[in-house]
């Protein structure tokens, strides 16, 4: 909430002679009201007027550009400089020349972002599959409208769509383009608005036309039978999943997988990738492959380079001798954007409101809108013919007595009286009289008038037919169907994206774990230095080296492929693999875990474990006497996340933790030297990692829990004294007689 200015600030401002005695006062206003007044109009403007496409398949920026080019005559004329087009478009689109030219680039044939480009371009317009290939400036390139734009503007001058004023009210522009085919399904389109987004994948024009025709005949038509799958401008192979596509067609949301096309040249021992997914770029693929090579995860590649030229995309991978190209590509498909997911979010503006629709709903909205366009066109044509018929009926009246008409005109003294006199003399209205009065002298003959009046019967028949069409839904659907067939015949193209139906019958092989498999010994010091030592190296020298003031803390045996969970005092868990640590020797300090795992500043290791197959539980004991039992599987992640926050509760410092594979007894010791023996089966597992646990030991505030050991490690002689029937319990004071001498010595050395 905005605050009022202090009196000192007001006085300081009023004392300034430049203020001219004016006072400014800041009024308090709730932040919700500020958002509603200032932010919501902006958000709605972005949604409605910028980022989300409408039912014709265009955003306002696309529509303004294409209509400007149409108005410039670039549908039939030769190309002109792009800078000229951009300048003219600014009369409708005030967002600047750079934004307009970027829009033109995306619609161009040279850029290749659309299955059917709308701009016939000449010059360097970049490439959709390249992140770094910049297009030339608008002063160097040329453009005109592509032939398919004739279907966008067909009959636009026959009242098929509404026109509105441009931003300064000096020009008119269409609210929509009367596309004769469902361009919204053919042209890929993406947009990010405020609080919502849109992502429309393209479909094959021929399949879209067939599907729309079938839908017009039968609204219950099976869409998937004719609209087989999306078709992407960059080609590739679509991994067909009928259930996934059916869900996308029904809901308008989802994603499908597309992989690159490649070929193996055995004579040169190399792989050529020549089509990639629409959602990625060649540079992104190159960067990811280079990363895999650098980290040693891919060892079959000798070199990779981009050999893209005027003939098209080509990424070349040189293989090492003996490398299997099929296995390598399977690995690259899993680890790089050579196989990627294409997301779908069919969010479209309908009547100014954004709606996420499935394909059937889109076809319903498009056909309803297109039927209105055709009806308006027919109605416009019918009215034009009615106007002509009205004139000819007046002319036929004149045919009855041409001489009288001439006499009326000759005997009228004033020019302004000619039309009224004709109206009176022949019983015709003003429009008809104006038409008769404007006939040239040479045309006042029976032959001319007879020829014109013979059209009356034809016009009346045509008007009757048009009236029937306007009132007949079936006839309008037939017109749309005929137009769709013509569009498919003239502009239909084969699919670019190949559909792979049988990829599920031969499932991808599981990625082979190429990490060397051998036993290792692990040592962790009190200061956090970690060593992984092979049994052979340990046999040669077993004396461990530590920094001054440091010493041994934890020791395990495991395998080089094992994972390691490292818990810190900031309630975070770092996941790593033993294979990421180099084999060490007893004579070195080892890896410092906070540095190796990129821990936060001043973060300290409090416990480490090897989870194995993630079976069992983790027991956390806190200084306040509470204990939490959490399933070890709670730390398993599907993705390769390296850090988990909220690994355990932060309500009390951690006193100890242990990995529990089977139930056993534990000895808990406090700073008061009280001991309590509990059975782990008494602790119920909790669902969340950050649970505070349950109280197992009642401890006075001045004391705390300091040690947790298994009963075997504690080496208690009279253990029954320290057991309790119910929890929580205070425990009993620890007696020296109940400890073996070895344990007493250990306690003395620790104190």
Image (cartoon, rainbow, N blue to C red):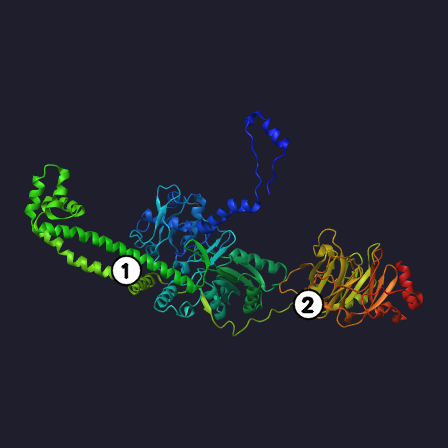
Q: Is residue 680 left or right of residue 134?
A: right
Q: Report which residue position mark 2 lands on.
A: 633
Q: Looking at the image, which residue is at 18% across and 53% down? A: 389
Determine which quarter of the picture holds residue 415.
top left
Q: Is residue 248 left or right of residue 742?
A: left
Is disc 1 placed on a helix, strand or loop? helix
Count of marks, rendered view? 2
Q: Looking at the image, which residue is at 21% across and 51% down? A: 387
Q: Position of residue 177 (x, y in %)?
A: 36, 53
Q: Report which residue position mark 1 lands on.
A: 470
Q: Looking at the image, which residue is at 39% across and 60% down? A: 365
List the single residue furthest toward the right.
737
Determine which quarter of the picture holds residue 187.
bottom left
The correct choice, above or below, for 251 with respect to 174 in the image is below
| Quadrant including the N terminus | top right
Q: Position of residue 401 (x, y in %)?
A: 7, 49
Q: Looking at the image, which residue is at 83% across and 71% down? A: 725
Is disc 2 placed on a helix, strand or loop? helix
Q: Position of residue 428 (x, y in %)?
A: 14, 48
Is residue 491 in view from this perspective?
A: yes
Determine which quarter of the picture holds residue 178.
bottom left
Residue nearest the observer in this picture, 647 or 79: 647
Q: Position of residue 624 (x, y in %)?
A: 80, 59
């Amino acid at each position: 909430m905005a605050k009022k200015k202090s009196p000192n600030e007001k006085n300081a401002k009023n004392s300034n002679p430049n203020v001219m005695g004016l006072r400014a006062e800041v009024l308090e206003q709730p932040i919700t009201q500020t958002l509603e007044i200032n932010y919501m109009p902006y958000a709605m403007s972005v949604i409605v007027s910028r980022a989300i496409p409408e039912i014709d398949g265009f955003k306002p920026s696309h529509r303004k550009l294409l209509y400007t080019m149409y108005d410039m005559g670039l549908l039939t004329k030769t190309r002109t400089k792009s800078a000229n087009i951009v300048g003219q478009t600014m009369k409708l689109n005030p967002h600047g020349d750079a934004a307009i030219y970027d829009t033109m680039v995306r619609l161009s044939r040279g850029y290749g972002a659309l299955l059917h480009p709308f701009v016939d371009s000449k010059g360097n317009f970049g490439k959709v599959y390249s992140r770094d290939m910049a297009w030339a400036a608008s002063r160097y390139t040329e453009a005109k409208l592509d032939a398919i734009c004739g279907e966008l503007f067909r009959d636009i001058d026959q009242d098929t769509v509404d026109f509105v004023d441009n931003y300064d009210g000096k020009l008119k522009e269409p609210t929509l383009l009367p596309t004769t085919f469902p361009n919204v399904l053919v042209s890929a389109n993406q947009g990010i608005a405020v609080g919502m987004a849109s992502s429309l994948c393209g479909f094959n024009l021929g399949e879209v036309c067939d599907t729309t025709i079938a839908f017009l005949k039968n609204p219950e038509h099976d869409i998937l039978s004719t609209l087989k799958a999306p078709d992407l401008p960059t080609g590739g192979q679509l991994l067909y999943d009928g259930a996934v596509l059916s869900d996308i067609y029904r809901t308008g949301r989802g994603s499908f997988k597309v992989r690159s096309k490649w070929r193996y040249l055995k004579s040169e021992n190399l792989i050529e990738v020549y089509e990639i997914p629409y959602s990625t770029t060649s540079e992104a693929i190159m960067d990811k492959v280079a990363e895999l090579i650098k980290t040693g995860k891919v060892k079959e590649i000798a070199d990779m380079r981009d050999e893209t030229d005027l003939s098209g995309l080509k990424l070349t991978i040189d293989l090492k001798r003996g490398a299997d190209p099929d296995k390598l590509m399977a690995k690259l498909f899993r680890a790089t954007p050579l196989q990627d997911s294409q997301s779908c979010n069919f969010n479209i503006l309908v009547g100014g409101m954004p709606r996420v629709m499935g394909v059937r709903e889109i076809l319903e909205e498009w056909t309803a809108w297109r039927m209105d366009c055709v009806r308006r066109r027919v109605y416009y044509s019918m009215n034009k013919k009615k106007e002509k018929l009205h004139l000819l009926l007046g002319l036929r009246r004149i045919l009855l007595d041409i001489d009288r008409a001439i006499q009326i005109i000759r005997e009228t003294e004033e020019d302004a009286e000619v039309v009224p006199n004709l109206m009176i003399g022949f019983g015709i209205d003003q429009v008809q009289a104006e038409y008769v009065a404007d006939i040239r002298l040479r045309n006042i003959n029976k032959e001319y008038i007879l020829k014109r009046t013979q059209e009356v019967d034809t016009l009346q028949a045509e008007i009757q037919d048009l009236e029937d069409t306007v009132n007949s839904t079936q006839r309008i659907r037939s017109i749309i169907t005929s137009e769709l067939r013509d569009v498919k015949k003239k502009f239909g193209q084969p699919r670019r994206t190949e559909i792979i139906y049988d990829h599920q019958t031969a499932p991808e092989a599981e990625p082979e774990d190429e990490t060397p498999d051998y036993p290792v010994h692990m040592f962790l010091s009190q200061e956090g230095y970690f060593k992984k030592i092979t049994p052979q190296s340990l046999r040669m020298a077993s004396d461990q080296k530590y920094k001054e003031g440091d010493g041994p803390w934890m020791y395990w045996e495991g395998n080089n492929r094992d994972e390691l969970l490292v818990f810190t005092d900031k309630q975070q868990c770092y996941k790593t693999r033993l294979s990421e640590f180099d084999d060490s020797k007893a004579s070195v300090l080892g890896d410092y875990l906070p540095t190796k795992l990129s821990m936060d500043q001043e973060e300290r290791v409090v416990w480490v474990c090897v989870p194995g197959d993630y079976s069992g539980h983790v027991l956390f004991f806190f200084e306040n006497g509470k204990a939490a039992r959490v399933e070890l599987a709670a730390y398993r992640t599907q993705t390769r996340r390296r850090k988990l926050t909220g690994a355990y509760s932060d309500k009390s410092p951690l006193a100890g933790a242990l990995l529990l594979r089977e139930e056993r007894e534990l000895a808990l010791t406090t700073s008061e030297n009280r001991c309590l023996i509990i059975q782990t089966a008494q602790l119920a597992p909790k669902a969340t990692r950050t649970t505070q646990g349950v109280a197992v030991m009642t401890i006075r505030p001045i004391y705390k829990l300091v040690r947790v050991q298994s009963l075997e490690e504690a080496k208690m002689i009279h253990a029954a004294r320290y057991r309790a029937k119910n929890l929580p319990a205070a425990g009993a004071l620890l007696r020296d007689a109940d400890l073996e001498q070895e344990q007493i010595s250990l306690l003395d050395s620790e104190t």
